[in-house]
Image: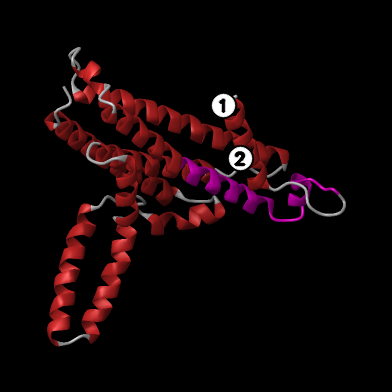
Amino acid sequence: MKGFRWYALVVASLTYLFGCGGGDGGDTGLQQITFIDKGAVIITAASQLSNFATIIIPALGLMLISHHLGNRSIKMVFTKPCPPEAWLVSSSISAVIVAALFYIGIFLICTMLFAVWSIQFQWGLVFVLLNDFAHTLIWLGYITFLAVFFRPVVAVLFVIIFQEGSFYYLKLLLISGIKTATGSLALFLKLAKGLVDVIYMLLPLTNPFQEKTEHVYKSLRGGDADWLTLIATWGYALGISLFFFLLAGYFLKKKRLI
């Protein structure tokens, strides 16, 4: 029965995403789509599904780590003996496999839409999905690290508050205030900006090279330079994920779980 509810939820979500019904003539959603830009529909579908994956995959990783640490079931693993790194590797690989399957599913759905609507396939779709997959790995590593210290609700609040985008705009706001402020207020704003700069430098970039890839997301078309940007994004994603993984393993050893 539980599986049926999940199936119904997926069907309802896809129905809402693509639109169905409406109008006195009883036209279906796919029939109505023929009156608008089909390419834009594919871009929107890929974007929405990819955004969902970027949220749900790190959330699943967070729940997995937090559940095991919360009920102390990890004690049975570490007394085998089994190092924390091995447990983290297995959990991370499971999440990455789920993410890969999710993005493969998005690719197949969008490819099917290209074929059904007789639209030339755009390789920018592969670029977008690979780029978003890298973003998911960054979030997964970040969330895994936070799960070692915080409960799920606290970890989510931490992620919401401490985002590099929020602190970037806060920096711009403080710079603007410093230019117009005088006296003690100017000194306070400068100190605040210094603190914000430190926090901003410590936070991971969850969407590196965003400015260089926006045009590919809008048109699903790119050049050789864009693929080099994708390689750089994956390099950063793998590097920061490994960094958070090593930190999580180190602090996991320090926790009294056995």
Name the residue that disc number 1 marks. Answer: 2
Residue 234 makes an appearance in the image: no
Whether 137 is drawn above or below 179: the answer is above
Q: In which quarter of the image is residue 236?
A: top left
Q: Quadrant of residue 54?
A: top left
The residue located at (12%, 83%) in the rendering is 184
Whether 50 is drawn above or below 60: the answer is below
Distance of label 1 from label 2 (alpha carbons): 28 Å
The residue located at (42%, 50%) in the rendering is 226
Residue 182 percent across, percent down from the top left: 17, 87
Whether 183 is drawn above or below 138: the answer is below
Q: Callout 1: 10 Å neighbours few (<14), some, many (20+)?
A: few
Determine whether label 1 and label 2 are within 8 Å by CB.
no
Provide the residue span drawn in magenta.
26-53
Residue 14 percent across, percent down from the top left: 63, 41
Q: In which quarter of the image is the N terminus?
A: top right
Name the residue that disc number 2 marks. Answer: 110
Main SS of the magenta part reads helix
**Which amino acid is tagged 1?**
Lys
